[in-house]
Amino acid sequence: MGAGNETVVAEFILEGFSGLDQRLQPFLSLILLLIYLTTVTGNTTIIFLVCVDHRLQTPMYFFISNLAFLEIWFTSSTTITLLVILSSGRRTISLSSCFAQCYFYFALGCTEFALLVVMSFDRYVAICQPLHYAAIMKQQLCTHVVVATWVISFTLSSYRLVLLSKLTFCGPNKIYHFFCDNSPLFKLSCSDTSLLWKADSILISFVLLGSLCLILVSYVRIFHCILHMPSASGRKKAFATCSSHLTALAIAYGSCIVLYAQPTEEVSLETNTVVALLNTVLYPFLNPFIYSFRNKTVKLALEEALGRAKVWLFPRS
């Protein structure tokens, strides 16, 4: 096609849930809004409790609070767009906003997988080497590791933004998703996207498979240590904690493997949308309950914080 006949695309149209009955869209929008507000409130509560309660100022809860902070931004990067689509019907998104959403979605996702690796190592040290835990997991080391996960993940993901900015979009502008995911976006470009596809596949494989292998190594060693515990109650408690964590990991890695670790032609649009909802909406919603609110120490800290808030708001006359 000649350059003179090309029309540069200035915005995209997000076609996710376009086939949903108009009468169901407000209902689904309300449910998603409640889930989103619960996710933000729950994760913010965890961050607040870790900051104010000395019992929660441990390496484990330091990592969990960082994960909670990340989850707020991760779910916000896509859920807000979906809420706008369902509540107002506005489906357009500018080119720059689409690129920014794509960048932050993947950068935050990479950071999350790196944090999950760190958290699994923390659990390994706590369960298998409890006497050396304080000496190994020092506050300075934990801070450096968390900063490194954020910096490295965002730096590695920056290549996508550079390559995306060089693409030209001159044809159809409909993205068959509820946010700017990589494969539907790349397919719309009239530029050569072979380099971007290859670089994306390498990064996704490295992040997904690399982090999964490290987590599996940690949990294999954890289960080995649990099986050799002398106390039956200790084994039961450790298994209960690990099983809830593994459930969260199964949702996170299972959804991403379905979305990104197989050819996109093999995944239908409906399957892609449902699995993406698990990854971007359900998983961040469940995390506070899996990692924190089931814990007795967190429950006690929350009860005390609510008690102090009640006294402050309704002082006795």
Image (cartoon, rainbow, N blue to C red):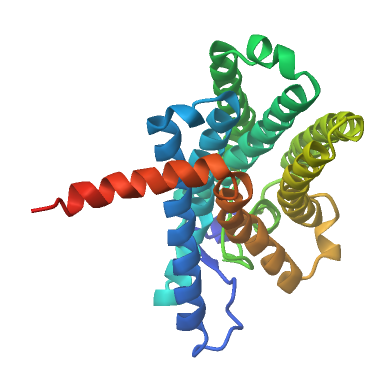
Q: Residue at x 58, y 54 (%)?
A: 169
* Residue lying furthest top: 135
Residue 164 appears at what percent x and percent y?
Answer: 60, 42
Q: Residue at x 15, y 50 (%)?
A: 315
Rendered view: 214 above or below 3: above
Residue 74 appears at what percent x and percent y?
Answer: 54, 47
State left or right for residue 234 relative to residue 135. right
Is any part of residue 215 visible from this angle? yes
Marks counted in the figure total 0
Rendered view: 279 above or below 118: below
Residue 224 appears at what percent x and percent y?
Answer: 91, 31
Is any part of residue 11 visible from this angle? no
State left or right for residue 308 relative to residue 288. left
Rendered view: 212 above or below 293: above
Residue 81 appears at what percent x and percent y?
Answer: 47, 62
In this orientation, which residue lies closer to the viewer: 10 or 282?
282
Quadrant assignment for the N terminus: bottom right
Image quadrant where residue 237 sits: top right
State left or right for residue 171 relative to residue 272. left
Q: Residue at x 45, y 34 (%)?
A: 50
Q: Residue at x 39, y 39 (%)?
A: 48
In this orientation, which residue lies closer to the viewer: 161 or 30?
30
In this orientation, which residue lies closer to the viewer: 92 or 6?
92
In this orientation, which residue lies closer to the viewer: 201 or 212?
212
State left or right for residue 193 relative to residue 97. right
Image quadrant where residue 128 sits: top right
